[in-house]
Image: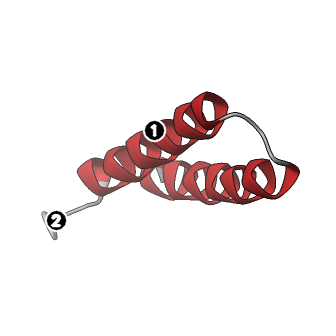
Amino acid sequence: MISLILFAAAGILVGGVIQLVKAGATKFSVGIVGVLAALATAGGLAWWPMGEA
């Protein structure tokens, strides 16, 4: 369940990166949101169930 929430957050953050780039935001702010998106994706993968019963 937590992995799905993290993947959803990553999707929202990726959308935020796209919008920041389109709006001409600074590279720093785009980078911060991009790093957060990457961390959310990594967390989602880390929490993904590996078939354990």
Q: Residues within 10 Å of mark 2 (few under 14, many from 20)?
A: few
Query: For residue 48, which quarter of the picture?
Result: bottom left
User: In x, y percent, where is residue 1?
Assistant: 48, 54
| Relative horizontal placement of residue 49, taking residue 23 as reference (left or right) | left
The circle drawn on residue 14 is none
Q: Please state which of the two labelled residues, at mark 1 or mark 2, is closer to the viewer.
A: 1
Q: Residue at x 56, y 53 (%)?
A: 10
**Residue that numbered label 2 is attached to:** 50
Q: Residues within 10 Å of mark 1 (few under 14, many from 20)?
A: some
Tell me: residue 42, above or below residue 28.
Answer: below
| Relative horizontal placement of residue 45, taking residue 40 as reference (left or right) | left
Check disc 2 and report its element: helix, strand or loop. Answer: loop
Which of pointers 1 and 2 lies earlier in the amino acid sequence?
1
Check disc 1 and report its element: helix, strand or loop. Answer: helix
Q: Of all residues shown, which one is farthest toward the right?
A: 23
Q: Nearer the viewer, residue 34 or 2?
A: 34
User: In x, y percent, where is residue 51?
Assistant: 16, 70
**Residue that numbered label 1 is attached to:** 35
User: In x, y percent, where is residue 47?
Assistant: 30, 49
Q: Residue at x 62, y 40 (%)?
A: 30
Q: CA distance from mark 1 to mark 2?
A: 25 Å
Looking at the picture, which amino acid does disc 1 mark? Val
